[in-house]
Every structure is written in C-alpha cells, then in structure tokens.
Amino acid sequence: MKIIILGGDGFCGWPTTLKLSSENHEILIIDSFVRRDIDKELGIKSVTPISSLKDRLDSWYKLSGKKINYLKFDIAIDYDSLLKAFNAFKPDVIIHFAEQRAAPYSMKSSWHKRYTINNNINATNNVLAAIVEIKLDAHLVHLGTMGVYGYKTPDIEIPEGYLNVKIQKENEYHDLEILYPSDPGSIYHLSKAQDQLLFSYYNKNDGVRITDLHQGIVWGIQTKETLIDEKLINRFDYDGDFGTVLNRFIVQSVLNYPLTVHGNGGQTRAFININDCVECINLAVKNPPGTNERVKIMNQMTETHKIIDLAKLISNKTGVKIEKVENPRNENAENELDVSNKNFIDLGLKQTKLDETLINEISIISEKYKERIDKNKIPCKSKWR
Ligand code: NAD
Ligand code: USQ
C-alpha cells in the first residue's frame, strides 16, 4: 500500500514508519520537525541521541534496501503543500500522528494553550478537508487518546468510543448511540476531543473512512526495527513536560532521583508498550472501515495501573525512594479505570504486559546515555491552575 505518515519523525511515528516499510509498504513522511524545535525551546534533549530524519532514512535505506522519502512542512498551516502531496502521492492510507501531544506543555501558558489548539485542530481539519477536496479514497488512521473519556469513571467498562443511551420522553424511552461523552483533563486532551467531532462530521457528510485510536500512555523506547542500528534509535523523553510517567520513573531510578509521584499516586491510567502501539497501528491499517461505515474507534491500550503501584514496582526493584510531590495538575486524586480493548484482541493483538525484561531494557538505555540527562529538567513545573 501507499502510506503517508504525518509526524513520522516522532516517538510513535518513527518506529511505525520502519515497521510498515519493513512490510514493503511505500511510505512518504510529512513532518515539520516542530518536536525537535520544542526541545530547543525547553532546553531539553531526548535521552537517546536521535539522528536527523535524513540520516535516519539514509541508514534505513543502507540497512534494508527500502527507500522512504520525506517532506518538511507544517500541516496545520501549509494547506497547499498538503494538497499537493496528497495529489502527487495518492496514498491508500494516511496515518496522522502530527499533533502537539504533551498535556503539561499544553498548560504552560496561554501561548501554549493557543498553540496546541491551533496546531492540533487545524492539522486534523486540513487533512480531512484535503481528502475531500481531491476526492481521495484514503483510509485515515488517527492517534487519539484514552484521556478523552476522562477519569470520573462511573462503575462501568469504558466502551470503544460509542455509548448506547436511552432518552426519556414522557413515558417512552428512545434508544440512541452517541459518542462517549468527552471529559478532557487538559487543553491537549480537549484538542483530541474536538478531533473526534471533526471525524464524526467528515465521516457523516463526506463518507471519509476513519479509524480513531484512543491510545493509552506509551511506555518503552525501542522496537525490533529501531534496534537494528544506533542511527535508527527512537526518541526517549524524560522531562517534566514530554516524559511520560513510567519511562520517567525508570530514568529517575537510574539517577537515584526520588520517584516523582503526583499527590498520593491514586490515579489509574491505561498503558501500552511501544511495540504494541506499532502492532495496533499495523492491524488498523490492515482492517479499514468499509464504505459508509461510521468512524471506527478502538481503545489502543493493554493494561491499567495506579501510578503509586508503578512507583512501588520500580522502587522495590531498584531501591530508589518514592517522593509524593504536590500535584501540579488539576486531576482527581484517585480513580478506578476499566477499559474494553476487545476490538484489538479480536483482530489478533498479542498483548505485551508490564514485564521485568522490558523495564530492564529501558534502564540499560538510560544508564548508557545518562550523561545526556539534565536532573533540573525532571520536575513537572507546568501548573494546571
Ligand atoms: P511526538 O511529539 O514525538 O511526535 C509528533 C510528530 O508530529 C513530531 O515529529 C512533530 O514534529 C510532528 N508534528 C506535530 N505537529 C505538526 C504539524 N503541524 N505539521 C507537521 N508535523 C507536525 O509525539 P508521539 O508521542 O509520537 O505521539 C504521536 C501521536 O500519538 C500524538 O497525536 C499523540 O497525541 C498520540 N499519543 C501519544 C501517546 C504517548 O504516550 N506518546 C499516547 C497516546 C496518544
Ligand atoms: N504523573 C506522576 N508523576 C510524574 C508524571 C506523571 O505522578 O512524574 C502522573 C500524572 O499526574 C498523571 C499520570 O501520571 O496522573 C499520567 O501522566 P503522563 O504524563 O504519563 O501522561 P499524560 O499526561 O496523560 O499524557 C500521555 C501522553 C499523551 C497521551 C496520554 C494518554 O503524553 O500524548 O494522550 O498519555 S492518556 O493518559 O491515556 O490520556
């Protein structure tokens, strides 16, 4: 298949690109490299030394014989280039990773709130409008988030995107299927909730075929393909804005830095390993929705954990202390979370669960590159209020 990967230079996009290229799909990456610019803005760098996209792709060509081209532009701003790229490449599939993805970054200031909304919503709307304008029969696969459901969970299993409700009119009840009500906890999560409405609308009005993957927190760094050579190594964020909780705890344990549990750590979240993230996207590409099918929503997660349990797991393993810090976020101190991921199980996903060997792998990478880590960048300084 011909596949355009929007945001293919990022943490989830890069290993997905290599996986799909290894399966002989023809790939074109579009990326503005804004994530690399944000590193400069925040004075941070990936724990792992990541090569330029050009060097990554040259190395992949030498090692695999597979050529991947890329274009550099901002899909939220440069609609004409997007249209031109879609028209010239004529993709069967478009995978959309190209959004600002850090909740703390989205809450740093009004500039960051406005940037996140402008970037994420315009990026998604431009992609959809371009598909419609040139009558492209492409399957759009989007990376959304589990966070759109929110964490005020009633005692039910969170379904995959849709909810059946009954509406009462006098003594009669009418059945209705609705998008699960959004309850975003940050401006970033709000942008993903807005994306859902854009998908629903373009699907209803224009018949665009869309899969929206509600992904949990990704942990792990490397995949089979990124491990082939150091030039292919994946990005690894550890800082207070972009680092995600489990990867951060592992880095902290290597530095003997007390594990930064927000509040009492009673928050339960959904998780997925990077290898499964890539596999799920591969499964989504292979199983597109049919013509006139509603937006296909799948929960891309494999397990849920309380933050304090993850901290205890790492602490017991490494001896590093746990420090309960004041929570900079405005979020429930405690929540339960029960999530359905039946769609991916039915598609044959072999789930990778939290595992000692994989945790060790991340520790080894952190140890190897620990000179690159700046302890001052570890605390989360972005306050929700
Ligand atoms: P990332 O920041 O590492 O990658 C995003 C890529 O998109 C970057 O290379 C960036 O330069 C590019 N990009 C952003 N805006 C762009 C624009 N307007 N034009 C062109 N390129 C642009 O993020 P990631 O961790 O790879 O996440 C990818 C997607 O998956 C995001 O949409 C995110 O919301 C979602 N997701 C990520 C996680 C996670 O834990 N990393 C979990 C759930 C969902
Ligand atoms: N947390 C800590 N200590 C830390 C960092 C985080 O206790 O040092 C807590 C946070 O307060 C929060 C939880 O851990 O309760 C998760 O935080 P996170 O930074 O790991 O994840 P989050 O902000 O939710 O965002 C990440 C990705 C985002 C994706 C989301 C999936 O950055 O792109 O959408 O995970 S989900 O959480 O399911 O919405």
Image (tube, helix red, strand yellow):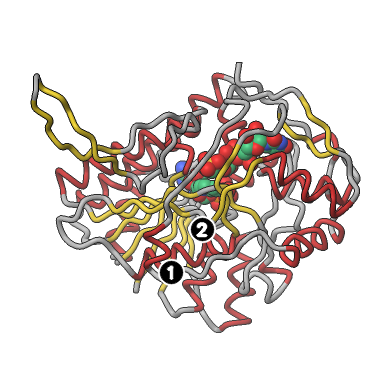
Mark number for residue 8? 2
Q: Horizontal and vertical percent for residue 274? A: 59, 60
Quarter of the image for residue 287 reads bottom left
Along the viewing direction, whichever of 262 and 39 lies nearer the viewer: 262
**Which residue is pictured at 46% across the width and 68% down the height?**
349
**Which residue is pictured at 26% across the width and 50% down the height?**
295
Residue reaching furthest to the bottom:
65
Kindly report the distance in space between the C-alpha atoms of the residues bearing marks 2 and 1: 10 Å
Quadrant assignment for the C terminus: top right
| Residue behind label 2 places its C-beta within 8 angstroms of ligand 1 | yes
Q: Reading the chain from its start, which is encountered first: label 2 or label 1?
A: 2
Where is 148 relative to 248, above or below?
A: above
Along the viewing direction, whichever of 364 and 113 lies nearer the viewer: 364
Quarter of the image for residue 125 reads top left
At numbered mark 2, what does the secondary structure look like: helix, strand or loop? loop
Would you name the residue on which mark 1 appears? 27
Where is 107 relative to 146, above or below?
A: above
Q: Does 177 sit left or right of 190 as displayed? A: left
Q: Look at the numbered discs 2 and 1 and tell me whether their residues touch, using CB distance below 8 Å.
A: yes
Along the viewing direction, whichever of 82 and 102 lies nearer the viewer: 102
**Which residue is pictured at 25% across the width and 42% down the height?**
200
At numbered mark 1, what does the secondary structure look like: helix, strand or loop? strand
Q: Horizontal and vertical percent for residue 291? A: 16, 60
- Please name the amino acid that badge 2 sits on: Gly
